[in-house]
Image (cartoon, rainbow, N blue to C red):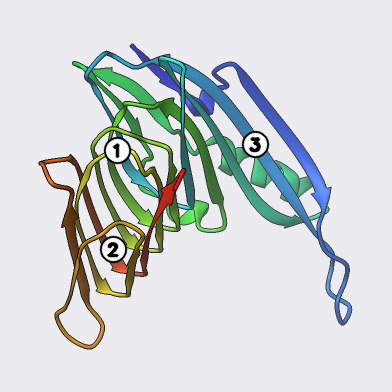
Amino acid sequence: MRFDIAMGFDIAVLTLLAVAVPVFGAAPKFNVEVVNTGQADVPAGGTIRFEDSYGELNIEAWDEPQMEIVVTRWTYVTDTAAERDRATQELSALHINVEKQGNDLVIRTPRRRRSHSEARLDYRVMVPRSAHLMIQHRVGDLVIGGVEGAIDASVRTGDILLRLPSAVNYSFDADCREGRIHSDFTGVYHRRHLYAEHFTGSGPSAGVAVRLHVGIGGIDIRKLGS
């Protein structure tokens, strides 16, 4: 199974909205968006993998067996026909692929070409509550809420915010190369040098593994339902 978010799987919407007024004689800027949404079944015991994503990645747990993903690609342009056409073509060329590989679902964002340097991405993803996540996020923030399965996530530049059920026993291994870590869960902080921090923690028994790494940015781990 394979589908391409950029090809309009389920829904594709193009909007043009004024977002700024002229300043010192500059032409006003407008926001062009292309929005696509799709669903895919998640195999029992499988892993949802995000590869080379960038922008804002928001993942939330729900009680459905499917994954639902909404990807918004947007940029600013001046309000001319040529600029709108150019932006539409460039945003439509950003192909985000979702395919099944064995028991895994892989969401792959191809490397951004120079012509896409102005484009921004926003991912809104609903996943089964027990889903296992493996995430390689390049630049931007990563937010995960309510997931009870194992998480292995890295962000090159940006923050990670986790909101996890307090009733689940987790085992944490988190580090920031340049940044700080905060956790509502009990654990031990290790300061390696002026900028780096490492956090480990677990309950009385081996818990669900949560491994986090940030290059430049911070990690915030919050309890839900406490």
In the image, 196: left or right of 8?
left
What residue lies at 29% left-to-right and 43% top-to-bottom?
135
What residue lies at 57% left-to-right and 35% top-to-bottom?
92
Residue density around tag 2, few if under 14, some if 14–19, many if 20 or more, within 10 Å: many
Amino acid at pointer 3: Val
Q: How far is the residue under mark 3 from the one under mark 1?
A: 38 Å
Mark number displayed over residue 214:
2
Residue underneath mark 1: 168
Work out whether 24 lies above or below 219. Answer: below
Which is nearer the N-term, disc 3 or disc 2?
3
Residue furthest bottom as drawn: 194
Residue density around tag 3, few if under 14, some if 14–19, many if 20 or more, within 10 Å: many
Residue 80 seen in this snapshot = no
Q: Is mark 3 on a helix, strand or loop?
A: strand
**Position in image of residue 140 (x %, y %):** 44, 58
Which is nearer the N-term, disc 3 or disc 1?
3
**Position in image of residue 134 (x %, y %):** 25, 39
Q: Quadrant of residue 46?
A: top left
Residue furthest left as drawn: 206
Circles 1, 2 touching at the beta carbon (< 8 Å)? no
Amino acid at pointer 1: Val
> Between 127 and 7, which is closer to the camera in this rendering?
127
Q: How far is the residue under mark 3 from the one under mark 2?
A: 29 Å
**Position in image of residue 113 (x %, y %):** 42, 51
Which is nearer the N-term, disc 1 or disc 2?
1
**Position in image of residue 194 (x %, y %):** 23, 88
Residue underneath mark 3: 34
Circles 3, 1 touching at the beta carbon (< 8 Å)? no
What residue lies at 37% left-to-right and 35% top-to-bottom?
147
